[in-house]
Image (tube, rainbow, N blue to C red):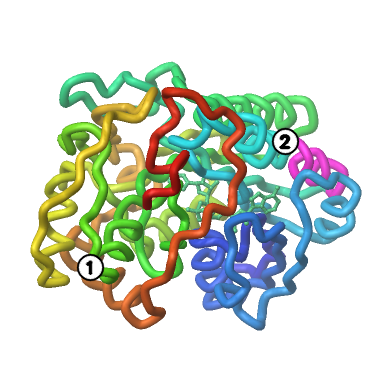
Amino acid sequence: MPKSNVFITGVAGFLGSHLADRMLEKGHRVSGCDNMLGADERNVSKDVDFYRDDARDFEKMKARLKGVDILYHCAAAPHEGLSVFSPTLITAHTYNSTVGVVSAAVVADVKRVVFCSSMARYGRQGGEGGIFSEDMRPEPVDPYGIAKVASELFIQSMAEAHGFEYAIIVPHNIYGPRQKYDDPFRNVLSIMINRMLQEKQPIIYGDGMQRRNFSYIEDTVGPMEKAAFEDNVIGETINVGPDDEFITINEAAETLADILDFDLNPIYMPDRPQEVKHASCSAEKARRLLGYQTKTTFREGAEELVDWIRMRGAKPFEYHLNLEIINDRTPRTWRDRLI
Ligand SMILES: NC(=O)c1ccc[n+]([C@@H]2O[C@H](COP(=O)([O-])OP(=O)(O)OC[C@H]3O[C@@H](n4cnc5c(N)ncnc54)[C@H](O)[C@@H]3O)[C@@H](O)[C@H]2O)c1
């Protein structure tokens, strides 16, 4: 395969940094930016040309994207639950970042844009036991999902007008090493592990029967790599993640407690507004177009994540994002900093 110049926004984050490592392994030249909103610079390989830039900054992005062939746009504030309480912040980093960097990509004549969307694009269409498939019309129910769908529409519109290639990848619930575990607003598995390592019971919103699929990072990166190079993905929207191991939040807590040998008795809190009860995707299209395969079971991936967090050490939670709307619907866990 010819070597390409690849630029990754959000490269100091979880997915962006793993993607950078994969691209470097394959001999591509990798550069990227991160504004450090949810990042850790230790994630970034020394072989990446790294810039502490904000993807919303059109002028800077224009300069950084000179000579780039592939743009992976991973930067976002991927805080779905928080987005109904901090919509300005979440929309700025999730939608405005797309406008900034994709407009710059047009000027820089980038060949292909691969955008990381989210299952939040489907809203509640999963229903009772239903499964999201790509032919469903997007019906997001929270500002984060709305910002992702708006980003998709923006990319489609700009691609139509200016003629670059694009693919929209819809990962679901990715987990694994490098995931931020001191962020009280997201990453349920990591939060639970961090608490259990501090001898604190995990906190579960609602009855814990919310059903999810979790995708191990290694299983996500391979298909994302293909999305940059294969012709059959151009203009496509593709879910990436397992559709064969459904797990409730209660079951996830039980597995983690078992790995950690922790005496589990979760603390249950009221449901969070707009939280979707069942969220599982069909992986049929990813199997067909990207050769997607689930290689890691939830138990195996959870063991890797526990090992990594243990190695880094448990940490206090950091309330690093501003709660914009504080009212009687704001989860007490956030308002009163209970996590
Ligand atoms: N992790 C998941 O389960 C999951 C699922 C579906 C979709 N996604 C999407 O994948 C992408 C990566 O998610 P992640 O889990 O690695 O999150 P992450 O928070 O680890 O990575 C996102 C990175 O973007 C950076 N960032 C935020 N705003 C920025 C801006 N304006 N300019 C430059 N950098 C900015 C953050 O500092 C962070 O390092 C996101 O777009 C997210 O919406 C993630």
Distance from disc 2 to disc 1, alpha carbons, whole Å, reads 40 Å
As helix, strand or loop, the secondary structure at mark 1 comes to loop
Residue that badge 2 annotates = 96
Mark identifier at residue 263? none
Q: Residue at x 32, y 47 (%)?
A: 241
x, y percent for residue 44: 60, 74
Mark identifier at residue 199? 1
Q: Predominant secondary structure in magenta?
A: helix
Disc 2 marks which amino acid?
Asn
Residue nearest the viewer, comparing 306 with 61: 306
Q: Which residues are magenta?
A: 99-108
Q: Is residue 112 above or below residue 84?
A: below
Q: Residue at x 47, y 56 (%)?
A: 183
Q: Is residue 173 magenta?
A: no
Q: Residues within 10 Å of mark 1 (few under 14, many from 20)?
A: few
For the image, the number of numbered tags is 2
- Verify CB contact (< 8 Å) between mark 2 and mark 1: no
Q: From where the camera sits, is residue 62 visible? A: yes
Residue nearest the viewer, comparing 268 with 97: 268
Disc 1 marks which amino acid?
Glu
